[in-house]
Amino acid sequence: MGRARYAQVAILVGVAVALQLLAQAGGKGFYLTQLTMTAYYTAAALGLCLFMGYAGQISLGQAGFFAVGGYTSAYLTTLDLTARRGEALVGLLARAQVLVARPDPYGGEALSVHPWAAFACAVALTLALAYAVGVPVLRLKGHYLAMATLGVGTIVYSVVLGTQRFGAADGLSGVPPFRLLPGVTVGGSAALRVQNYYVAWGLVAVSMLLFLNLVHSRVGRALRAIHGAEDAASAMGVHTARVKLHAFALSATMAAVAGVLLTHFNGGIGPSESSIMKSVRYVAIVAVGGMGSLWGTLAASAVLNFLSLRGTFGTLDDAVFAAVLILVMLFAPDGILAVDVRSALQALSRRARPSKGEV
Amino acid sequence: MLVELFFQYLVAGLTYGTIYAVVGIGFNIIYNTTGIINFAQGEFVMLGGMTAVTLSRFLPLPAAIGGAVLAAMAAGALIEVTFIRWLSRPSVLRMIIITIGISILVREGALLAWGEGVRSLPYFTGDEMTSLSVRGVHVSPQVLWALATCLAVVLVLGAFFRFTLLGREMRACASNRVAASLCGIPTRNMVTLSFVLSAGIGALAGCVVSPITYTQYGMGAGLAIKGFTVAILGGLGNSPGAVAGGFILGVLESFSIWVMPTAYKDAISISLLLAILFLRPSGLFGDREAARLKEH
Amino acid sequence: MMERTKTPMLASITALALAASAAPALADEPIKVGALLAVTGPASFLGAPEARTLEMLAEELNAQGGIGGRKIQLVVKDTGGSPEKAISFAKQLIDEEKVFAIVGPSTSGETMAVKSVAEEGRTILLSCAAAEVIVNPVARYVFKTPQKDSHAVVKIFQQMRKTGLTRIGVLTSNTGFGKAGKEQIEKLAPEHGIQIALNEVYDKAATDLTAEATKLKGANVQAVLNWSIEPAQSIVLKNVRQLGLAIPIFQSHGFANIQYVKAAGAAAEGVVFPAGRLIVADLLPDKDPQKPVLVSYKKAYEARYKEDVSAFGGHAWDAFQILARALREAGPDREKVRSTIETMRGFVGTAGTFDFSPADHNGLGIDAFEMLTVKDGKFAILGK
């Protein structure tokens, strides 16, 4: 059983490599930019799929966590603490290499946080937020849960939009590249395009592996038990509150990690990344792919995000997402991949007239 | 001077509050009959305002408003028949997602039809500068129109649900759908009717506040969130509760500006929403038992 | 003798023949100009008129035969105002479409996000956004066409001092434009002797601002400075007047759109603000150097789109025409066009007369602004 999973992920990696080589050969290397951005959005969607699809919860706040990760990293790596070098704490951090010098846009030097340290802060902050918010929020169900998560996302949006330090409406720009390892840097320049593609899809592959293993483990069964019937699961000894909380935190952290890396790739982030529309998109993608299907989510995210980032839908971008969302919800509530065409057509003719006993 | 300021803030709060309250009432009507939270509620407000502005170019104001309300009602019916009627016992998640999708489609449709510009209806009485002054506190007459409309809506709805056959049928549908259908009530049509009513109220609200604010294709989403907050605050399904909730939220927002930077005003309403959800999801005036039962 | 000259002659004839056959093919290829505009979304009041202006200009230019026999092909991308889309489309335009230059983006946040992308891709970027940081520090390929916020603030303060107003209340919207204005206002107030008694930021999507207006009333100010580029600024006007505050109201150049005047109705009477001369084109004296350019743009735009011109569309007009002039002078060579723009002087545009230099990639001075007011629901020149 385990082998099948590794084989599937290996196929994914193979497809990714093939795409890159094809693009290179066909002189269409520029597709890699949108594919890289798509990969990061896909990682966030996968996290949400775990929470929504398997645990059966609703979250309209995924974009908020994505933004918390991205903004934390952006803010810390664009700080300039040169003026405060004299202070004890600042001096200590500088000596410990947590603070490093980087060239600032005016030709001078700025003292800001090392990207790895910023990354650690981003993840820590997201975890703290997810657990703090998760405890009260996950006690709710249905509409209330949806609105609570929507509220969390909206607070993040209001805070980044209203705070001068975070760039207010302009967002933060000039975020330096993130050197992961010698020779592997996450940044936006053209020379780094190929390695960034592999870093991004590498993240997706690793997450897929992690989530697939999780889903087929005891934890995964606990998640699905909660999805099916929460009270029954609790009666069977599943610590429902704890499991939901951990799933929520994992989902949030996935989004934050993707947020950090995309911010370094783009060189900046804006309040639009935390907007309600973005959260709706993540939900739409998970719904289209099929709530309980990681592969479905991956496919849906890859296609929809790629097309959207290339501007294929033009001015009607949001409308297309909404239309796809509605169509899937009406005709294929278990996701596109689960559609059985013949029974769908039968259902269509049945729905036109109410059946006996249907209220 | 301080007392004057206090009352001025209060009036400002009531102005916001009316807008939120009417959207909240619209939520409640649909929720009561169907258990659905209609995220597209804010779009009805937008449609009402936009249609009225277009109609007012060749119709006198009252006719334009009437026309807008009718058009919105037709839109509400169309939406219900096209999207909602198909579903048999949908899950909460599915309903939320569908109504969100509908609200986006309506918004994009409005963008195509009317463009990105802002419009407003003329003031019903007076103009942009007139205000009535009561002991130093200034109120625009349009605010009074909005308050009066809100009151009228609550009264008329109350009477409708209490004294008319149709209203009572809808209430029956709300409390027990199966039993209602056993009594011969066409429950499917009741659902459509709830959308029609909700849309009409929203449109009327949109018309009456359009002079105060402005109408633009994207105004629906923000209103929906505030309206939902207010509906929950007052207890989901409880319309007078929604009105009270609306005024409470409005006044809270207004006074928050006195002490906090204006930029964080929206955070107030969201924090309030979260506080209610965490501490007392049945709302201030809602029935705890009913809230829990309605969930399933 | 004949032997020696035969081969070079043959070679040159062949070369000429090849050149002649190659030239028409080159001449047929259009010059691609990209545009990153916020046509829909929260900044649509900027991007939509900009997109319409560009389409109109491209068509006009192509109807006249293009530049050097080559037509202009406009590739407009709708970013919806979000920086991540702007980055994705910018890379697409530069790497894939291989555009010659890019007009836009519409907002400062998006421009800052793509500034380094354009610079690295060595593609000329003519931004329609106002922030100072776009051209300071100067990037070789990045220019902007809107006026400097600091000039607008100085003109307002000068007018205030002229009428003896020193204690003011400042309201700015929570957008990039508002934020930039706030910074300039706070920075320049002391040296002009202006005291800021109240300094508030309001939400651009607000539906009623009576509470903010009340706060203003409580602060006992002599004048109000309302700095915003969104529709909500009209609500401020209405609410202030409804509270019975009859003090003078000053606005920013973000008010330069007749829609905002209409939205505020009677409350807009007497508002004073600095702006480019486009919106009062018909009222200018005939000898004003900008008048012919402004009147012709206004007529063409209003005839075609049945709506009033706004300063925002004008920024796109300036960007396109500057590019066109540079292309005519230097031919379709990126480096040459770039240095042509950089040294262009005396270009008469809608926002003012541009004098570029390697250190100044904006080119507009304080006389780009005229102090305007609203009379009888229409724009008028202050003092005339």
Image: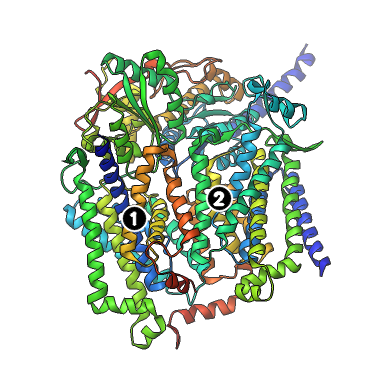
The quadrant of the rendering that contains the N terminus of chain C is top right
Chain of the residue that carries numbered disc 2 in the rendered image: A
Identify whether C253 is placed above or below B48: above
Q: CA distance from mark 1 to mark 2?
A: 42 Å
* Quarter of the rendering containing residue B192: bottom left
Question: Residue B242: image x %, image y %?
Answer: 34, 61
Q: Identify which amino acid the numbered label 1 is placed on.
A: Gly
Chain of the residue that carries numbered disc 1 in the rendered image: B
Residue at 17%, 56% in the rendered image = B62
The residue identified by callout 2 is: A312
Display colour scheme? rainbow
Question: Residue B129: image x %, image y %?
Answer: 20, 38
Question: Residue C382: image x %, image y %?
Answer: 25, 20
Q: Identify which amino acid the numbered label 2 is placed on.
A: Thr
Question: Residue C173: image x %, image y %?
Answer: 40, 35
Identify whether C272 is placed above or below A321: above
